[in-house]
Amino acid sequence: MASLGIVSLTSTLFLVLALATRASSSKLLSPNYYDYVCPKALPTIKRVVEAAVYNERRMGASLLRLHFHDCFVNGCDASILLDSTSAFDSEKNANPNINSIRGFEVIDRIKLEVDKACGRPVVSCADIVAVAARDSVVALGGPTWAVQLGRRDSTTASKTTANNDIPAPFMDLPDLINSFKKHGLNKKDLVVLSGAHTIGFAQCFTFKDRIYNETNIDPKFARERKLTCPRTGGDSNLAPLNPTPSYFDARYYNDLLKKRGLFHSDQALFNGGSTDSLVKAYSSNAKAFWTDFANSMVKMGNIKPLTGKQGQIRLNCRKVN
């Protein structure tokens, strides 16, 4: 019994230490980080993002997703941008990312323009990803927020962690809650950040089982999706995540009330569980959704950042210096 107590105490101490380290790292971030280092940094990122979204509206959702998938794998450290080397397999090859994660060319363009504007490489790829996500949401008519800045870039990546830690579109509510809790995010963050599915598109294989086999789905909606997502084949065919995939509104939540969530994980948020009340609240209050989304994005952006002398400022976002 005594040994069990020691193990329990040790585990608790490790948890407290980990949380303290995360908190101290995030405190080193500041929305004003580049004000003196390079005042042209943020305007340059915004200009390139706006041009990319103007050229292809879908790119806004892709850049937002890039930030999510980066932060959920060992923190917001731009590890998702790294190509494979002899030392590690790229997160780009993980199941949630392969043949679907995109926007790398836009990040490359931003990095080139920012380094040119600043006269030297002082802006991290991790900060570029975080700011590009915010600017993408704004470009699609959504809310803005003060992005905390000063992250540094990782020198490694983990395909295994990406496979294990990025939430899947097939998850039930308890698994989703646990996935977010692992990163210090609560049920409200889960529902709010899932609202990012108010923009963008999804490939057929991610929702095929839902439209053909699930019962908590509007029959008309299922028939519509089956037109471009056959039972056999067509796995990469695209479908909008909601009827207004190029505009950041609160329609996502209204669709869930009507059992028109595209992913199993979407509809899980409104299926008689503990998050139903939040979905109902946001369906009738877009302003509250915008406010809470901005707050949760800042919170997510603070997941295990590398700061100070940790990591590096990459010269090329795709490879370690």
Image: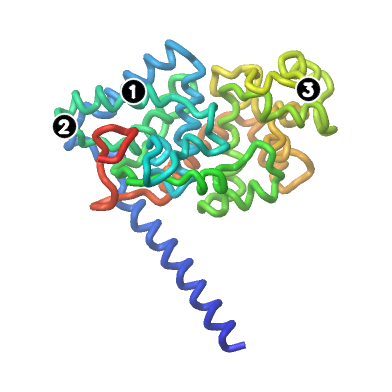
Question: Of marks 1 and 2, which one's residue comes earlier in the chain?
Answer: 1
- In the displayed structure, would residue 300 be above or below residue 81? below
Question: Is 99 or 16 nearer to us in this picture?
Answer: 99
Q: Which residue lies at the image location 40% right of the left edge and 51% below the top edge?
A: 304
9 left or right of 119 in image = right
Q: CA distance from mark 1 to mark 3?
A: 41 Å
Which residue carries the number 3 mark?
Answer: 231
Question: Is 144 or 173 nearer to us in this picture?
Answer: 173
281 left or right of 64 in image = right
Q: Nearer the viewer, mark 1 or mark 2?
A: 2
Labelled pair 2, 3 in contact (Cβ < 8 Å): no
Q: CA distance from mark 1 to mark 2?
A: 19 Å
Q: CA distance from mark 2 to mark 3?
A: 52 Å
**Callout 2: helix, strand or loop?**
loop
| Quadrant in the picture for residue 148 | top left
Q: In the rendered structure, which amino acid carries the disc numbered 1?
A: Lys
Q: Which residue lies at the image location 84% right of the left edge and 22% below the top edge?
A: 219
Residue extending furthest top?
55
Q: Nearer the viewer, mark 1 or mark 3?
A: 3
Q: In the rendered structure, which amino acid carries the disc numbered 2?
A: Arg
Image disc number at residue 46: 1
Q: Which residue lies at the image location 32% right of the left edge and 43% below the top edge?
A: 153
**Callout 3: helix, strand or loop?**
loop
Labelled pair 1, 3 in contact (Cβ < 8 Å): no
List x then y, in percent, for residue 5: 57, 83
Which residue carries the number 2 mark?
Answer: 120
Q: Nearer the viewer, mark 2 or mark 3?
A: 3
Position of the C terminus, as image quadrant, is top left
Q: In the rendered structure, which amino acid carries the disc numbered 3?
A: Arg
